[in-house]
Amino acid sequence: MRRLFALIALAVLVIAAATIADYPGSVDITWQGWEIGTSVGVLVAAVAVVALVLWALFALLVGVVRLPRRFRRNRRERRRRAGEAAVTRGLIALAAGDAAAAQRHAGRAETLLARSPLTLLLAAQAAQLAGDDAAARHRFTALLDEKNGEFLGLRGLIGQALKSGDREDALRRARRANGLLPNAKWVFETLFALEVRAGRWEAARDALDGAARRHLLPEARAAHHRGVILHELSCAAEAAGERRQALALAASAAVAAPDLAPLAVRHARLLIAQDRRRAARRTVEQAWRLAPHPELARVWAELGGAGPALELVTWFERLAAHNPDAPESHVAVAEAALAAQLWGEARRHLGLAIAGAAPAAPSRRLCLLMARLEEAEHPQTAAARDWLDRALAAPPDPAYVCASCGGESPDWRALCGNCDGFDTLAWRTPIGASTAASLAAERLEAAPLLAFPGSRTLAGQSEG
C-alpha cells in the first residue's frame, strides 16, 4: 500500500513539473513594502523547501517530546526480554532438578516481569522443588487473583492439600476448578476420586454423569463406575430403612455392572427378603451367564431350600446349564454331588473343572475337593493324602485382586482396602500368593503444573 501511495505521489510531481515547464509564467508578490518577482517554478520550489524545513523542525520537536516515552518503552522491552530469558533459564533449572538455580531465576523473573501468571507459576514450582511448601502455597494463592491464573493456582493448591492430607480442602478446590474448566480430565479424575473416597456417592454420581456427557472417559467404564456407585447408594438406602429404594438401586447396579457378582448377590438377597424368590432365581441365573461365582452358588443353594441332597444336584445342574463350560459350574455341581454321595458324578465334574483350568495346575480349592472325594469314596487310601499334599503347593484360588496395586481382598468392595482405588477389584487368580505384601499403596496427589523430575503425579484412575 505504501508503495502505491509513493508511486501516485511521484506521478503527481512529474505531472506538476511538466505542467510548469510547459507554462513557465511569472509571479509578482507585494507585501509590506516588499516586492518579489519570480517565475512559477522558482516559487513552487521555494514553497516546497520551506514546507520541508517546517516538517523537519516539527519532526525534531515531536521526537524531543517523545524521547522520554520512547526511552521508557525501550527500557520495558529490555526488561521484558531479560525477564523472558530468566523464565527460560528457570524452566531449564526445574527440568534439571536444580532447586537453587530455579529459585534464583524465578526471583529475577518476578523482579523483571512483576506479578504475572507465568512468573508466579515458575516461582511456585521452584519453591516446591526446594521443599518450601509455604512459599509455594503463597504463590499459588496469589495466582487465584490473576485473571488467567486462577485455574493454575487451584491446581497447585489441590496438590498442596493432597500432599498434606487435607482432602476436604482439596475437594473444595477441585469443585471450584471443575466449575472453571469442566472439560479438564484431570479435574474430573481428582474430584471423582475425592468424592468416592469421602463416601459422597450422590456427588460422585453427579461428577461421573457430567464427565460422561463430555466424553472424558469411555462409555463402558462410566457405566461400570455408575453400577458401583448405585450399589453404594443402595446400601445407604437400606441402612436408612428405604427398602424399596434400595431394591431399585440394587437392580440398576446389577444391570450397569453385570460382571460383578456381588452386585447380583445383593440384588438377589434383597428380593429374597421380600419373598420374591422367583425374581431372585432369575437374577442369579442372569448373573451366572456372565460371572459365575461361589457366592452366587450359595444364594442358589438357599433358593433351592432344604430338600433332599439328590434334588439339590438337579437344582445345581439347572444353574450350571446357563454357563455349562465354566469351571465354576462344574465345581458347583460337584459339591452338590459330593453332598449326595454321587461319587462318579462328582469325579466327572471335578475332572472337567481341572481340565478347564489347564494348562495351569489345579487350584488349592480343586485339590481339596478331590481330597474330600477320595477320602469319602476310598477311605484309608493314599489318594486323599496325595491331593492334600498337592494342595499345599497348588496355585492360589481366585480372589478379588486390585488392578491398581495388586492387593488381594477376600470380599469385594467399592474401594480397595490397600490403595483406596475405586472400582479396581476384580475376581481373578492372583499373580502370587501374597501380591499385596510386595506392592506399596498408591497415594492420590495432584499432578504438577510442569512435568519435571522429582514432581509427583496425579494418581490415575484405573480402568476398573
Image (cartoon, rainbow, N blue to C red):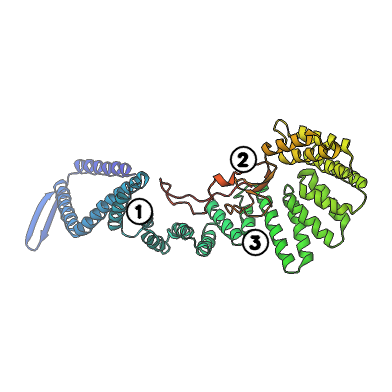
C-alpha separation, residue under disc 2 versus residue under disc 1 = 40 Å
Amino acid residing under circle 1: Ala
Q: Which residue is mark 1?
A: 130
Q: Which residue is mark 2?
A: 432
Q: Is residue 405 visible?
A: no
Q: Nearer the viewer, mark 2 or mark 3?
A: 2
Is 203 placed above or below 360 here?
A: below
Most foreground residue, 48 or 427: 427
- Tell me which residue sits at (92%, 47%) in the image: 311
- Dot 2 and dot 3 residues touching (CB under 8 Å): no
The one nearer the camera, 69 or 152, is 152
**Is 337 situated above or below 277?**
above
Q: Would you call the spot at circle 2 few (<14 residues within 10 Å), some (14-19), or many (20 or more)?
A: few
Q: Is residue 391 left or right of residue 164?
A: right
Q: x, y (%) of residue 326?
A: 78, 38
**x and y percentages locating residue 203 in the rendered image:** 62, 62
Q: Name the one closer to the observer, 127 or 174.
A: 127
Furthest residue in direction left, as rendered: 33
Tag 3 residue: 201
In which quarter of the view is residue 334 placed? top right
* Residue furthest bottom in the image: 241
Callout 3: few (<14), some (14-19), or many (20+) C-alpha neighbours within 10 Å? many
The x, y position of residue 402, in whole percent, is 62, 47
Is disc 3 placed on a helix, strand or loop?
Answer: helix
Q: Earlier in the sequence, mark 3 or mark 1?
A: 1
Location of residue 346 with respect to 27 vertically, above or below: above
The answer to whether one can see residue 388 in this image is yes
User: Earlier along the polypeptide chain: callout 2 or callout 1?
Assistant: 1
* Residue occupying image coordinates x 62% and y 40%: 432
